[in-house]
Image (cartoon, helix red, strand yellow):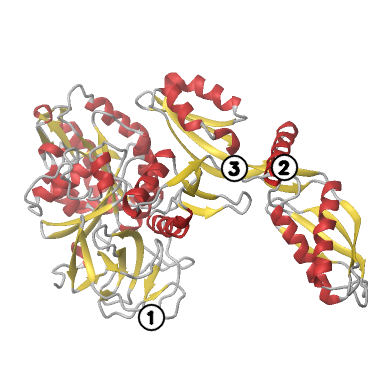
């Protein structure tokens, strides 16, 4: 099936916002209104076309992004529905790379929530056009006037209603084409005038005409809308009730008529280049993967990409990143919820998928145009659990399952911690990781034990130990072992890493044995000295030593390197470093004092605070990661479940002396218990 549309006919939109705002219901209403589906899917009833996994149906919420597409008004609209829970933000952020327009959905009943603000800001920072949809306008006891005012306060005066609710949420009134009339939110004429002025301000010639005539023709305003949206000068606000399909056609009309096409929206370019990639079907093929998913029925991996230039056919010889080897994608697909339809080709501006290729989120596919393309920045996953398979025979299976989840979610990481030797999974929050483990059990039949992970401390020195000597001798009748080394140890700058400096003049140590000293030092650094954590940020100067003509060998100098580091380390002011995180806590304003006190008790240092509409506040602080092991449950207890938080690694800094001694004592005790087993 050849596409019957061009890049100018494509509209790529992403639905973002907080959980429960009705994003999936909005997508379902679009599918039904356009006749793409013959029934209106329901999230609560488990009949959604987009929440296809058993996990999503059970939780009645999205945990991954989902794609669908509709034809409307002669345009092809690609829609990405994203999860709204802050724990599942990774797929939502990555999917920003696939579109020109972000549609931020807000529940009229719940108002502006945590993820509403964050995703709206991320979309703006990434350079996308933005719209706001206030959904559920048919709910009871809602304050739409207050919510609209809050939207303008939080997201700026560029947020202008293009329609207004009417008949108690049973309909909407157009503000763009109508200059009079009434609505549930007052006079339509006032909203019309404000909208026209906002559009005129983004276009110099229209501004002059508006000053001369006092008004603009609706067709002129509509023609200027795509540029105003793309430039951020206007953020249209619309009203809908998705479950009763109120305002859906009006939303579709705005998307097809005013949302920027791939020709008009955010330009994409290779990193370090000023020239944008031209979104023409006849150009060289360039695309970028923004989603990886596995079909639960066939177990086939699909990679979803946005085509920036050229065409993709089943026989196109593509390259991935810097890899010069070519490969053919096989079939090209369009995804429609859980279904995938084979098409003849994908064109510039479109969103398509290929199967079975070993691709990752962010990969650039091309036919010779090597380079990186910017991806939205995702938060560093800082919430951790140490896991261990209940059955030893499942170790490899667990690794395989974790590899799949790591591919599919840019905010999920699994690795074996070099400092603690634990298999640690990291995510955005507790719900995120518990969902991963639930999917592992459901999809792979794997059970694991979990526990809080050990904190990844690091060891370093603060002083200088000059000319520390160690001699290794071993004589057992035959060939012996001999190595004498003298080193000076000093701290490197923070994050400066490890440096081994050969300062020997002459042949005090034969040249072949000097790398052996370095090797021994690095072995001991990995094992740690103070409390068994890796040593970082040190400089080791090899200043002198001695070689025996018969007994000196590689292993002897490795041992000498290990032992001399222990001696020098003890003399150079050894300290432990701990990870410090930036934590952002969103809570009701009534809980601010309690939260500030709790963070202070965790050695937290405040770094800022903002008040949000709806009686919420954001508190920012820097806090040691070691103090946050039970924070999720504590926050829930203080706020009655209304608080949320995110954290990202900031830096490492020295552990206070009294805390350091406790950690060292615990490490010694654990080591002693291990020996006695």
| Cα distance between the residues tagged 2 and 1 | 55 Å
Q: Of the numbered discs in the image, which one, if any, rests on residue 587?
A: none
Q: Are marks 1 and 3 in contact (CB under 8 Å)?
A: no
Q: Is residue 464 left or right of residue 663?
A: right
Camera-side residue: 197 or 509? 509
Residue drawn at 69 percent across, 56 percent down? 526
Which dot, 2 or 1, sits closer to the camera? Answer: 2
Residue 290, placed above or below residue 149: below
Q: Where does the image place residue 58, in percent across and percent down from the top left?
A: 25, 41
Which dot, 1 or 3, sits closer to the camera? Answer: 3
Badge 3: how crowded within 10 Å, few (<14), some, or many (20+)? some
| Cα distance between the residues tagged 1 and 3 | 44 Å
Q: Is residue 259 left or right of residue 504?
A: left
Q: Which residue is mark 1?
A: 326
> Reading the chain from its start, which is encountered first: label 1 or label 3?
1
> Reading the chain from its start, which is encountered first: label 2 or label 1?
1
Q: Which residue is mark 3?
A: 454
SS of the residue under disc 3: loop
SS of the residue under disc 1: loop
Q: Which residue is mark 2?
A: 672
């Amino acid at each position: 099936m050849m596409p019957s549309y061009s890049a100018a006919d494509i509209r790529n939109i992403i639905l973002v916002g907080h959980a429960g705002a009705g994003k999936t219901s909005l997508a379902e209403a679009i599918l039904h209104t356009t006749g793409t589906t013959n029934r209106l899917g329901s999230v609560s009833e488990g009949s959604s076309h987009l929440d296809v996994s058993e996990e999503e149906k059970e939780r009645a919420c999205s945990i991954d992004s989902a794609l669908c597409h509709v034809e409307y008004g002669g345009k092809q609209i690609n829609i990405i529905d994203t999860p709204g829970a802050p724990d599942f933000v990774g797929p939502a952020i990555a999917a920003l790379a696939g579109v020109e327009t972000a549609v931020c959905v807000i529940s009229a009943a719940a108002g502006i929530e945590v993820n509403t603000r964050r995703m709206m800001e991320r979309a703006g920072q990434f350079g996308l056009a933005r719209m706001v949809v206030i959904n559920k306008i048919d709910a009871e006891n809602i304050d739409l006037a207050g919510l609209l005012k809050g939207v303008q306060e939080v997201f700026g005066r560029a947020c202008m209603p293009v329609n207004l609710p009417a008949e108690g949420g049973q309909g909407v009134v157009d503000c763009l084409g109508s200059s009079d009339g009434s609505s549930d939110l007052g006079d339509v004429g006032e909203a019309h005038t404000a909208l026209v002025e906002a559009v005129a301000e983004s276009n110099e010639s229209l501004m002059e005409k508006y000053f001369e005539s006092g008004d603009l023709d609706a067709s002129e305003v509509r023609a200027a809308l795509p540029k105003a949206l793309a430039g951020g000068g206007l953020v249209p606000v619309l009203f809908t009730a998705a479950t009763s399909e109120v305002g859906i056609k009006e939303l579709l009309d705005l998307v097809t008529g005013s949302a920027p096409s791939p020709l008009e929206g955010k330009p994409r370019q290779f990193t370090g280049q000023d020239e944008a990639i031209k979104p023409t079907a006849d150009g060289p093929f360039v695309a970028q993967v923004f989603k990886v998913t596995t079909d639960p029925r066939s177990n086939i991996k699909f990679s979803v990409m946005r085509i920036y230039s050229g065409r993709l056919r089943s026989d196109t010889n593509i390259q991935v990143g810097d890899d010069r080897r070519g490969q053919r994608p096989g079939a090209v697909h369009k995804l429609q919820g859980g279904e995938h339809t084979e098409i003849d080709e994908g064109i510039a501006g479109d969103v398509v998928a290929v199967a079975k290729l070993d691709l990752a989120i962010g990969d650039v596919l091309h036919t010779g145009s090597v380079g990186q393309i910017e991806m939205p920045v995702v938060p560093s996953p800082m919430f951790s659990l140490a896991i261990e398979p209940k059955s030893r025979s499942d170790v490899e299976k667990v690794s395989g399952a974790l590899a799949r989840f790591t591919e599919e979610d840019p905010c999920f990481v699994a690795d074996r911690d070099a400092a603690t030797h634990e298999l640690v999974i990291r995510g955005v929050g507790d719900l995120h990781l518990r969902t991963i483990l639930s999917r592992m059990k459901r999809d792979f039949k794997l059970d694991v034990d979990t526990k809080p992970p050990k904190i990844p401390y690091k060891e370093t020195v603060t002083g200088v130990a000059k000319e520390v000597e160690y001699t290794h001798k071993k004589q057992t009748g035959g060939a012996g072992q001999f190595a004498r080394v003298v080193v000076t140890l000093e701290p490197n700058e923070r994050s400066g890493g490890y440096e081994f400096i050969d300062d020997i003049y002459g042949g005090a140590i034969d040249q072949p044995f000097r790398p052996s000293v370095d090797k021994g030092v690095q072995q001991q650094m990995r094992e740690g000295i103070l409390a068994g954590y890796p040593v970082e940020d040190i400089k080791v100067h090899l200043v002198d030593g001695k070689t025996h003509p018969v007994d000196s060998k590689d292993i002897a100098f490795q041992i000498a390197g290990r032992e001399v580091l222990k001696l020098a380390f003890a003399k150079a002011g050894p300290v432990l470093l701990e990870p410090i995180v930036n934590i952002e806590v969103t809570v009701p304003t009534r809980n601010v004092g309690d939260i500030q006190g709790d963070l202070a008790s965790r050695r937290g240092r405040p770094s800022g605070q903002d008040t949000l509409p709806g009686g919420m506040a954001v508190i920012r602080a820097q806090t040691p990661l070691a103090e946050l092991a039970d924070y999720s449950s504590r926050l829930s207890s203080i706020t009655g479940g209304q608080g949320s938080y995110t954290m990202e690694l900031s830096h490492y800094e020295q552990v206070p002396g009294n805390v350091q001694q406790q950690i060292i004592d615990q490490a010694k005790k654990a080591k002693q218990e291990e020996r006695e087993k």
